[in-house]
Image (spheres, rainbow, N blue to C red):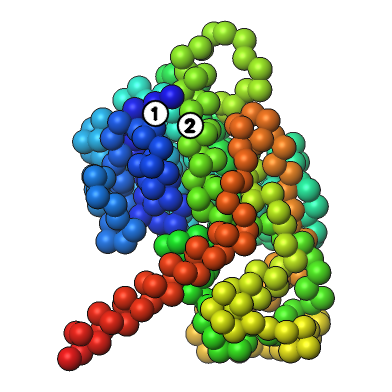
Amino acid sequence: MSLGSVLVIGGCGLLGHHIVKYLLESGEATSITVFDISTKFNRYPGVHYINGSIASIEDISSALKESKAETIFNTASPDPLTASKRMLENVNIVGTQNVLDCAMEYGIKVLVHTSSSEVVQNSYDDMIWIKESSPLPESPVDGSVYAKTKQVGENLVLKANGTNGLLTVAIRLCTIFGEGDRILMPHIVELARSGRARYHIGTGKNLYDFIYAGNAAEGHVLAAGKLVDASLSQGAKRKNKVDGEAFFMTNGDPWPFWDFSRSVAREIGRPIADKEIWRIPLVLVYFFLSIFEWVYWVVTMGGQPRVTYRMLRYTVQVRTFDITKAKERLGYRPRISMEEGLRRTVSCHIASSVTNDNSRSLYAS
């Protein structure tokens, strides 16, 4: 199977650069071009990089012409904790439509779109082995702008399937981690080093799905391969349809939520014994954090702190997803275990931190 010339939108981000890495190692692309708002991080030799904004249809059009893309992976998405409403809409909705419009204009056949498991989440209630057949709520995650914009973007992608020969698929990821993570892992390592990782909200028994970025990357490439096969056999009856479909993708091994941070602590040499854990009831957190949010809102005249009660509710929620569909139709198998994925991620983070510290020391001298 060959994906031909590939354009990875958001290819310097966590998932995007793992897709690039997988394509380089597998040889399933004749050429690889990365399009991103910034191409300073997570670069690979032999890959062509283009700076631009997904919110600009001119930038997308130019990148498609320059790359001569036959296959597109759209992994672009802002950090949901820091991005403004306008940025989320520009990237997840306007940007997604720009990619679709340009892909259909240039006759591209394959588009794999990165969606989110949050598109099916109604509130912060437990989600137990959720399947793709679950209905999409009108206002996911209690009105979360990130969840809503991802939902709208996914709908745009799936509805475009079959238009002008374009075949599309949406991959709904859960919480992702891996080498090159500049959002989740630095935060958890800092908590572990400071000793704050011993404070757990709730019982800590709630199962939670994660996915290692390398596995997610392979899953995206598998989906693209299935779309290539489908494009070559259009008109024929096909079992296990992939195009126009959404797929949940996880590591297939849900952990109790706080075991993730405890494993990171152990990897950096700061293991947390059971007797050291402080379990804090959610209701107590709610009381103090609600006061803090109100004070912050008053002082900043309508601002919202980085950490809110709504976000912390994830830490006590069950979030597990059924990946049977991805296994049966895509041939997806998470080859890298949670333990191995975490070992690789933490090792890379420590190595990059040492390199950055040494660079700062040399500069200071």
Residue 35 location in percent, x, y? Answer: 31, 47
Residue extending furthest top?
Answer: 236
Q: What residue type is labelled 1?
A: Leu
> In the shown orientation, is residue 142 left or right of residue 31?
right
- One can see residue 157 in this view: no
Residue 200, by quadrant, is: bottom right
Which labelled disc corresponds to residue 46? none
Task: Residue under label 2, please give it.
Answer: 224
Vertically, is 329 above or below 127? above
Vertically, is 193 above or below 29? below
The answer for how far apart the CA atoms under marks 2 and 1 are is 7 Å
Q: SS class of the residue under badge 1?
A: loop
Residue 27 location in percent, x, y? Answer: 36, 35
Question: Tags 2 and 1 in contact by the CB under 8 Å rule?
Answer: yes
Q: Quadrant of the N terminus?
A: top left
Q: In which quarter of the image is the C terminus?
A: bottom left
Q: Which residue is drawn at 57% across and 8% down?
A: 236
Q: SS class of the residue under badge 2?
A: helix
Residue 178 location in percent, x, y? Answer: 50, 60
- Give the camera-side residue of 208 and 267: 267
Q: What residue type is labelled 2?
A: Ala
Q: Which residue is drawn at 23% across and 32% down?
A: 65
Which labelled disc corresponds to residue 3? 1
Vertically, is 301 above or below 206? below
Sequence order check: which comes first, mark 2 or mark 1?
Answer: 1
